[in-house]
Amino acid sequence: MSSIKKIEVFFLEYPFPKKLNYKYSAGVVENMIVPVVKLTDSNNNYGLGEITHGQFTYEPIIGLIKHFSDLLKNTNSENINQAWEKMYGSSVFWNREGIGIGVMGGINIAMYDLLGKRMKIPVYKLLGGLQKEKIRIYASNGLFDNSKQLLEDANRAYSLGFRVYKMRVIDPDTVSDLVKSFNKKFKNRMQLIVDAVQGSSANPWATKVSVNLAKKLEKEEIVFLEEPCRVENLNGYKEIKKYSTLNIAGAESIPTARAFKKYLEEDVFDILQFDIATSGFIEGRRICDLAYIHNKPVAIHSWGSAISIMAGIHLGLTVPNVAFTEYCFMEHPINKELFENKKIEIINGFTPKPNSNGLGVLFKDVLSKKFQYKEKINTMISTNNDEIKLK
């Protein structure tokens, strides 16, 4: 038996060159921030996880990692279910949803990775084995306000084997032209997902704007429209579903199956999305199973590094109703340092089952210096007091 010796978090950061100018409807993306969970056992083996919430905040992650590390210290590292329930049970008064679940999710992924590394088997075998031999994966970026950059980036994705690409909305009045330019260039070769990014916007559009956007995009060929409303706005989602035939997807910031339950009962999503580096494998599987009962496909959200990308792949391979998993396609060098084989194989839009011990990721302590993190106010979600877009 090996016991948990310690749980640490390492923040890695890569500032994007100004020329990339990544932005979207609710903010700008100036840095790639990767909060890596490293769980070490009593034999000095380690497993890796990731915490999506750490892209937005720093000090709460540090405190919660210490809290859960103290709680799990000296417990059996193989008892992953027990660890999850212990973390949740000890924090249930303040942690039914939100950042605490996100930290638990990162630890959960690291525990599976550790066990897979120790047993010399892929994580998907620990999750019940394969349901499919390969999983559809899409390139996720499109943080551009002009067709030149958008098409160049999409072409880069196509050349690497992707056949589905996701773009972000910057302005609902101009996005239709960008969609048209994409579909003209990649017709019958690559499909498009459009992310309105209103689910966690600090200053979301009026529902009417989202309804009108959905009507416009109906005329174009897209796979689905993601988060056209703030997550809390169930009536807004109902309005869009009433007036549009588009597939509507959401919502990555909903962390648990219990939290998703009302959205499924109200039938506001055609495709469910949860964030793998928030929900982890245990809660992620519960969400998939709940979606399965309601006959809904799942698109795993993975807006992070190689760690969360691989976690999405492993889980997706084991679940029948997972249609897609996501590959964060912003340009940065961190993934090459984390992927066990520097990159993953993508063939005609699919990635095959990984032949890895654990997730297929590794970590060297020198990365903390190479990609040194500087604590700051994150600009990814803008809190400027802009006028609400009404039409």
Image (spheres, rainbow, N blue to C red):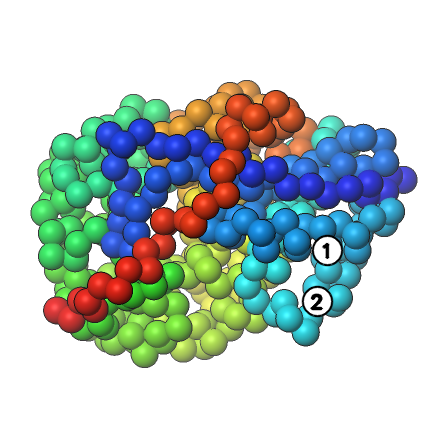
Q: Secondary structure at mark 2?
A: helix
Q: Nearer the viewer, residue 137 or 320?
A: 137
Report if residue 197 is visible in the image: no
Q: Quadrant of residue 171?
A: bottom left
C-beta proximity under 8 Å, tags 2 and 1: yes
The residue depicted at 39 percent of the width and 38 percent of the height is 31
Q: Nearer the viewer, residue 336 or 222?
A: 336
The residue depicted at 44 percent of the width and 57 percent of the height is 252
Residue reaching furthest top? 341
Residue reaching furthest right? 1
- Quadrant placement of the C terminus: bottom left
Report if residue 304 is visible in the image: yes
Between disc 2 and disc 1, whose residue precedes?
Answer: 1
Q: In this figure, which residue is indicated by the disc labeled 1? A: 67
Please name which of the two marks, 2 or 1, marks the residue nearer to the observer.
1
Instruction: Locate residue 379, reporting x and y percent.
Output: 36, 49
Disc marking residue 288: none
Q: Residues within 10 Å of mark 1 (few under 14, many from 20)?
A: some
Q: Is residue 196 left or right of residue 311?
A: left
Instruction: Locate residue 132, reporting x and y percent.
Output: 53, 41
Q: Nearer the viewer, residue 11 or 260?
A: 11
Q: Quadrant of residue 235?
A: bottom left
Instruction: Locate residue 88, reporting x and y percent.
Output: 70, 64
Q: In this figure, which residue is indicated by the disc labeled 2? A: 91
- Quadrant placement of the N terminus: top right
Q: Quadrant of residue 283?
A: bottom right
**Amino acid type of the residue tagged 2 in the rendering:** Ser
